[in-house]
Amino acid sequence: MRTLYFLMTSLIISASTKAQTNMMATNPVAEQIMLGNYNPTNYAATNVIANPATISTEINSRVSTDSLLAYLHGLRSFQNRNTGSDTVSATKGIGAARRWVFDKFQQFSIQNDNRLVVSYLQFDLDVCGITRHRNTMAILPGSDTNDKSIIIVEAHIDSRCAGLCDTSCIAEGMEDNGSGTALVMELARVMSKYTFKNTIVFVAITGEEQGLVGAEAFADYAIQKGIKIKAVLNNDVIGGVLCGKTSSPPSCPGFNEVDSTHVRLFSFGGFNSAHKQLTRYIKLEYKEMLLPTATIPMGIHIMTDEDRTGRGGDHIPFRRNGFAAMRFTSANEHGNADVTAPGYDDRQHTTGDILGVDTNGDTIIDSLFVNLRYLARNAVINGNAAAMAAQGVKTPSFNFTYLAGQGNNDISISITDPVGYNNYRVAVRSTGNDWDSVYTFNTKLCTIPNLPQVNNIVSVAAVDNNGVESLFSIEQMGKLSIANTPPENNNIELLQNIPNPFDEKTMISVKVQQTFSYRNAHISITDLQGKVIKQLPIVLKPGINEVIYEHGYNATGVYTYTLVVDGKPVQTNRMVFAN
């Protein structure tokens, strides 16, 4: 995973200011499939397994730690997968690595009725002296060409040492990001057995460490060609369980702490974010389809920010191009990648990012830094979510109103569903990144009683005959009571921070009813003794306006935050940190 401060280097500035050119799928059939121009019968499985519950169960049982280990050994054998490394050698460098992944994808296809269409996405850009680069794709065509949207499961294949363009060091890059690449490869193998309505693209991305250039090429290519992307699941640093001495917040609590039962889901935005909605969907599908039979339950944390502080990943270019995108990252990371800091000796972005060590001298690595069972569990969470989203259930729209009545705190929901599924889920949240409750109805006119007198944020999904939800709709917000808003300022409302608390950051939002004139505005955060801790500038436009406050790991206590407009306090709320 790249570190954003490297953008200040001259090389990154040079690379990031030049647009990728000559973007093309080397296999023309691949492009046509991503556009929805193909005959689905040509890619139908011999024995179609249509039941989503069966598919979910089989993905869970078929993801193999042995396969994941074999991929990791294969990736480490290329020694250095820097974007600027050798593209000609058959045994070393990025070229050999991507050809090996390409061949593996081809093998998976042969094992599954030749159903995977394998291609490179090629583009030109000068990165570390290499001008032509390739993402490696395995495309599983969907059965419904009327719905031309695709789902992408991705990870970056490139590795690095301290030097951004060091192509001579040993850079196995096992946690960052052999783990993600192995996960994507295993899902391509496992999921190519099944038929989904939506097309799924499994892709090993290049150039992440040099400015997300491979992901940017794919995202821009999709815009130029008119490819419709429904969801992007990015996997980056997804197999390690040990905490380093340093780690980019929000992250692990201390050196050598172990966590193999939690995973972090990062995404952009707060209210009405398609990206946050995608993470909530992933978590819901896990809770309802996998958790009831899980031998080792996984805690899925929906994080506030798009990535760790000062960091970024390959989901970001897709988000910038308007596609719903998110990132899976392990709970613990071995380092913050600040390799120039004095005394930095964590593994990330060094020659030390290896698979593991030989503890008994028999030349076999027997103590792994990549936890295979943890990686497999994360692969299953990915595969299950992608499989359910690929069922092609269409998302409905809705309106909701509050029912005024004596003693009632009820909302009425009216769903618009052109498809006519006749079964729906309604999700409600208030003070957290996650949904408080998800209700099930078999009518388009729904009522939810006795909601709390807070901001209630509502979204809906349709449910097909197999019990599979669509992705959830845009969110709508309402409040049963706004008594704490001064009447003279009822055009502006300072909302309760979300989450309160959860991770090392919290979202503070201001709701503006209509445009008004002002010179400047900020959120002032103080402790209970009145000491100002932070001032966050905020732009006030009609709608929901958000800023993120980083309160830090293990912050505790009660703080106040005040909206200040043109030097005058408008409204104050309290937030409680107890994480």
Image: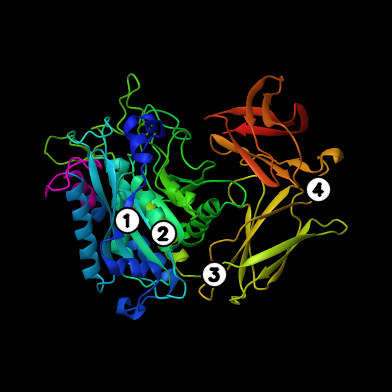
Residue 63 in view:
no
- Say which residue label 1 marks: 23
Instruction: Give residue 386's quadrant in the image.
Output: bottom left
Q: CA distance from mark 2 to mark 1?
A: 10 Å
Magenta portion: prevailing SS class:
loop
- Horizontal arrangement in the rendering, residue 407 relative to residue 216 (left or right): right
* Residue numbers of the magenta segment: 70-92
What is the three-letter code of the residue carrying label 1? Met
- Say which residue label 4 marks: 481
Q: Nearer the viewer, residue 187 or 10?
A: 10
* Mark found first going from the N terminus, 4 or 2: 2
Residue 462 point in image, percent of width and height: 58, 69
Quadrant where the image shows the N terminus: top left
Instruction: Give residue 106's quadrant in the image.
Output: bottom left
- Residues at marks 4 and 2 touching, judged by CB atoms closer than 8 Å: no
Q: CA distance from mark 2 to mark 3?
A: 25 Å
Residue 222 in view:
yes
Q: CA distance from mark 4 to mark 2?
A: 46 Å
Q: CA distance from mark 4 to mark 1?
A: 53 Å
Magenta stretch: includes residue 77: yes
- Say which residue label 3 marks: 394
Q: CA distance from mark 3 to mark 1?
A: 31 Å
What is the three-letter code of the residue carrying label 4? Ser
Q: Residues within 10 Å of mark 3 (few under 14, many from 20)?
A: many
What is the three-letter code of the residue carrying label 3? Lys
Residue 485 point in image, percent of width and height: 81, 40
Instruction: Determine which of the numbered discs, if any, sits on residue 224 in the image.
Output: 2
- Residues at marks 2 and 1 touching, judged by CB atoms closer than 8 Å: yes
Residue 22 point in image, percent of width and height: 30, 55
